[in-house]
Image (cartoon, rainbow, N blue to C red):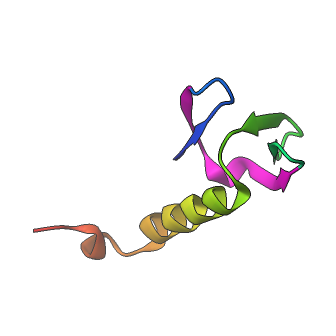
Amino acid sequence: MIILTRPNGKTFFINPELIQTVEATPDTVITLINSKKLIVKDTPEQIAERFIEYRRKTLSPFDAQKTN
């Protein structure tokens, strides 16, 4: 899950695997795979960065995620 911010400042979590597209129109509009659209304060670049970090965490071997 990644955290995003609604235009009213409230944050929420979303499964990034459900994101189909992210557009700046100038608001950031996320279109989900079910065609639902969400408007968020986060920039497309921030969302992409969070998605990349999410994928790194979910695809890395379990031992690599451990911290001692």
- Stretch of the chain drawn in magenta: 10-24
Question: Left or right of 60: which side holds 39?
Answer: right
Residue 60 location in percent, x, y?
A: 41, 74
Residue depicted at 65% across the width and 31% down the height: 6
The residue depicted at 58 percent of the width and 27 percent of the height is 9
For residue 39, above or below residue 68: above
Q: Is residue 49 magenta?
A: no
Vertical placement of 47 versus 63: above or below? above
Where residue 13 sits: x, y (%)? 54, 37
What type of secondary structure mainly makes up the magenta span? strand
- Residue 51, by quadrant, is bottom right
Q: Where is residue 47, by image quadrant? A: bottom right
For image coordinates 68% across by 40% down, the residue present is: 41
Up the image or down, 32 lies above or below 51; here it is: above
Quadrant where the image shows the C terminus: bottom left
Q: Which residue lies furthest to the front in this view?
A: 26
